[in-house]
Every structure is written in structure tokens, then in C-alpha cells.
Image: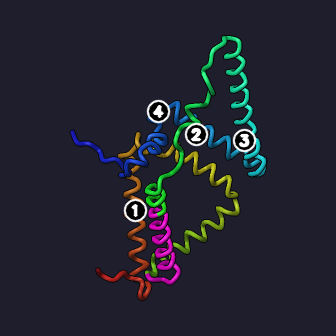
Amino acid sequence: MVTRAHPFRLHQPFLPAIDLLYWRNVKQSGAVFSSVLLLLFSLTQFSVVSVGAYLALAALSATISFRIYKSVLQAVQKTDEGHPFKGYLEMEIALSQDQISKYADKILLYTNTCMKELRRLFLVQDLVDSLKFAVLMWLLTYVGALFNGLTLLILAVVSMFTLPVVYEKHQAQIDQYVGLIRTHVNSVVGKIQAKIPGAKRKEE
């Protein structure tokens, strides 16, 4: 039996996030999805400062109440179990120098790659790619007129938690349609390249 390749090949640190997006554990994915959506919807109604303050108050209310409850329970039962959050207080949460260097190197790599790509597009190293980028920016002006940033972020989160599952279940049909669209787009781009002087890519 032929094993279908996974559409995304990612390194080990990204696998937990991929499991969340593919709903491998329904409870975990549902909790993260609903929490993120609740946060984003809250930001549509309140300022970032207000949402942050309310979240901090909610967390403090929960921890303080639990601490008082455990203290009263220990006093009634005459036990000495210690601080209820002792395990978490003793847990090491600091980033090591190696971890900081690793993440800093990744951010630097992505930043440099992005800057080089933008330079290539804005300085028209390849005319067709720059025209594609211009069309994309033009389309985004209409998207920006219809949606604000938070709405787009909400749509992005919903898409992240739904599209991977849909693709996994209907990969063959989606790949077929995407292939047809890509062939048609490449055909149109080829015709444009043939008609615009200097637009044809150089052979490598």
C-alpha cells in the first residue's frame, strides 16, 4: 500500500502545534481554539489593556481563591501539605542561552530572507514576480476595505483550525483542482511573459 506523503514536512518542535491544528486530541484542540477565539472576540469589544487586565484579574481570582481554600482545608484537617502551587513555583521556566541563541538565529534567518525577497520584488529583479506582488497588494486594498485587522486574524485562526482537517480528508480532490488551477495560471503567465519584452525568465 502506498503511503501518502504528509503535505507539510516540519521539524520536531512544530509537531505539537500541527497536532493541535489537525485535532489529534479533540479536547486540547477545542480548548485552544475556543480560548483564542474568545480572546480575539474580546479584543473586538475592549481595548488590549482592558482585556489584559481582565485576564490577569481572572487568573488572580482563581489562584487566590484556590490558595485560601487549600489553607482553610489544611487548617481544618490539621495537615501540612505546604503551598498548593509549590511544584509550579519550583519549576524552571527560564530560557537557556542555547535556546535564546537558537530562536534568535531562526528569527534572524527569516528576517533576512524576507528582506531579500522584498528587495527582489520592489526592485523588479523578475518582472512577472513583481507584477504578481503588485496584483496581490491591489487585492489586499479591497480586503482591507472590507475587514479590519482583528477580523482577518479571526478568519485566519478559524482557517488554521479547519482547513488542515478538510485538506486531510479530501486531499486527492483538492490536489486535483489545485493542479488544474496552477496549470491554467502558468499558461496565462506564460502568455504574458511571451508578450512583455524582458518578462521571460532567464534560463538558469
Q: Which residues are magenta?
A: 105-125
Amino acid type for the residue under numbered disc 3 = Ala
**Does residue 38 appear to the left or right of 112 in the view shown?**
right
Residue at mark 4: 25
In the rendered structure, which amino acid carries the disc numbered 1? Arg
Q: Is residue 185 above or below residue 6?
A: below
Identify the main secondary structure in magenta.
Answer: helix
Residue position for label 3: 56
**119 within the magenta span:** yes
Nearer to us in this view, 201 or 7:
7
How many other residues sit within 10 Å of disc 2, few (<14), some (14-19) or many (≥20)? some
Q: Quadrant of the C terminus?
A: bottom left
Amino acid type of disc 4?
Asn
Q: Position of residue 201 (x, y in %)?
A: 36, 81
Q: Amino acid at mark 2?
A: Phe
Q: CA distance from mark 2 to mark 1?
A: 32 Å
Looking at the rendered structure, which numbered label has been put on residue 182? 1
Task: Give the secondary structure at mark 1.
Answer: helix
Residue drawn at 49 percent across, 46 percent down: 163
